[in-house]
Amino acid sequence: MLLLKSILFVLLLVLPNAVPAELDWWQNAVFYQIYPRSFKDSNNDGTGDLRGIIQKLDHLVDTGVTALWLSPIYSSPQVDFGYDISDFRDVDPLFGNMSDFLELLAKAKGKGLRVILDFVPNHSSDKHEWFEKSENSVPGYEDYYVWKDGDPSVPPNSWTSYFHGPAWTWSTKRNQWYFHQFASAQPDLNYRNPKVVQEMKDVLTYWLDLGVDGFRVDIITALFEDVNYPDGPLDQSAYRSDQPETYDMVYQWRILLDEYQKKNGGDTRVMMTESYADADKLFGYYGNATHNGAHFSFNFWFITQLNKDSTATDIKGVIDKWFNNMPERYTANWVLGNHDQSRVASRYGTGRVDGLSMIEMILPGVAVTYNGEEIGMENGKVTWSEGWDPQGCNGNEEDWEKNSRDFQRTPYQWDATVNAGFNEGHKTWLPVSDKYTTLNLALQHTKNLKSHYRIYQELVKLRQTETLKFGKLRTFALPNNVLVIIRELENNPTYVVVVNVGDKFASVDLKSVASQFVVQIPSVQSSKIPKSIIDGSTIYLVGFEAVVLVSV
Ligand SMILES: *[C@@H]1O[C@H](CO)[C@@H](O)[C@H](O)[C@H]1NC(C)=O
Ligand SMILES: *[C@@H]1O[C@H](CO)[C@@H](O)[C@H](O)[C@H]1NC(C)=O
Ligand SMILES: CC(=O)N[C@H]1CO[C@H](CO)[C@@H](O)[C@@H]1O
Ligand SMILES: [Ca+2]
Ligand SMILES: [Ca+2]
């Protein structure tokens, strides 16, 4: 009894420091990105839709994720697959209608899933009513977009669109040029016009009123350009990306979200921003000394700074760089893929799929999963004539493989039935990968089978432990190309991820961490037995093997 009392006493002394306040719902969440066109086609027209997503909500529940982010579902001519929006307040008929969306929202919430919408503020479609009015100089709408006078044969400056060709298109209706960072069908909105600022704030409020849990802000970097649109052989990105006014707009949206919550109650409405910037520009999206910004700004460094040839030292470097630059009050996040990037399996090699999931999931903060990565989907095969993506199709055929983003957008591989279960055998908008008979969810779901999916599920579960929520982080890159990530928290088990980044046999000595470990989650190529005990002093790893261990 005395012993128990003294243990309790010690615990009480230690606990207040060791365990910080509970995390807010989003701070260790996994956000699952659904690319609606390719997820599930409920009506066999070849394109995924909202009713398809409703049918598959139980898959999300099964993964253990607690939030989904929908790529754009708004009315759109689909020039850039929904990122060209002709009505920010309605659902495209291709995906369903508003009642389908409301049903999706209610059913998702009923299953404990938060719903995040894509907010695409930089541009609208050229078919948006605002653009049509602006192009026709309807009073009040003249300055909704960026218009410049000039010679119809010479664009106002040398800037190029991200989708090839000049960033300017001549309007014969207005006899002026309009600016577009992306396709000419995606004219940039003019945020120096207070009416535009208010319109877009109203769009946010509109969806909040319908009950969404927050927004993922598309390509925030591009919002403002230098007011002079300077010409010449200059570093364009300095004038068209990450401008001071852009950060200010993010801070204004954050105020809107916070005030909305204050007024209407409920949980935090979250904002995440998309910028591929490096450290010097990126953290400004989280906020500054006096203002809060996004709850987190996507960390794409695994995508932009690592590849198939990266070593354990490179990976450790990217992780450490993040924490050395991020102010401590912010929440980290890790993004391995999305609909713009080659599939993880294709980018880093199929052998590294589980190791990367383990790294992403054991690190502190938010994890973001692009649909299909949980089963290790690979890039599909799409020929030049089958492709759709303007980034590929507007370029040359020789550059197709390099430019197109269609390969990572092929339909989700649900099972081994016709069209991978995406629909019932009708033509699909992009071809289904021919790998689907052996690479699909149903197969990986098989009981007692070791699979990318089973590993992913286990990892998501592990994130609920106190250690992974609050534990300190240590990282090591060993000379034999093995990466070790340790999470530890007083009075809790220590979790260690060991990843053999290379293809050579390797062994590691972890006895300074613990003399013995229990094997928690082995990668698919591992022969280690889950729940077995291994000695900390010599842990052998075959090429690419990865394993989550827990101290005993
Ligand atoms: C929306 O579409 C569904 C089918 O997906 C249909 O049953 C429903 O009647 C439609 N609702 C409205 C308001 O058009
Ligand atoms: C922080 O942002 C606000 C709002 O944009 C701005 O007024 C202020 O100058 C910024 N502070 C710093 C230190 O940059
Ligand atoms: C990851 C992502 O959402 N990328 C989008 C960024 O914005 C451009 C233009 O809206 C889209 O083409 C990308 O797909
Ligand atoms: Ca459909
Ligand atoms: Ca812009």
Image (cartoon, helix red, strand yellow):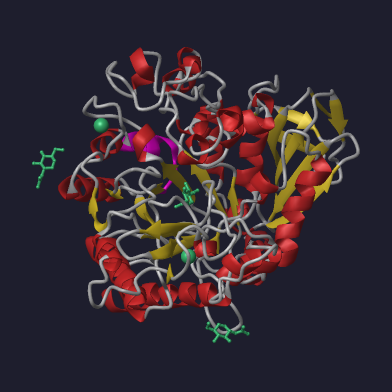
Which residue is drawn at the image coordinates 70% and 68% (left, top)? 280
User: Which quadrant is home to the N terminus?
Assistant: bottom right
Look at the image and give the residue range highlighted in magenta.
57-67
Q: Position of residue 114 (x, y in %)?
A: 36, 53
* Magenta segment main secondary structure: helix
Q: How many marks?
A: 0
In the image, 466 versus 257, the foreground residue is 257
Q: Quadrant of ligand 4?
A: top left
Residue at 49% across / 25% down in the picture? 384
Which of 438/35 is in front?
A: 35
Q: Is residue 65 magenta?
A: yes
What residue appears at the point 58 percent right and 59 percent down from the top-left corner?
Answer: 159
User: Residue lying furthest right in this view?
Assistant: 479
Q: Position of residue 66 (x, y in %)?
A: 41, 48
Q: Is residue 252 left or right of residue 395?
A: left
Viewer-closest of 478 and 101: 101
Q: Is residue 183 above or below residue 429?
A: below
Residue for point 56% across, 69% down: 285
Quadrant in the rendering for residue 107: top left
Rendering coords of residue 11 (x, y %): 64, 65
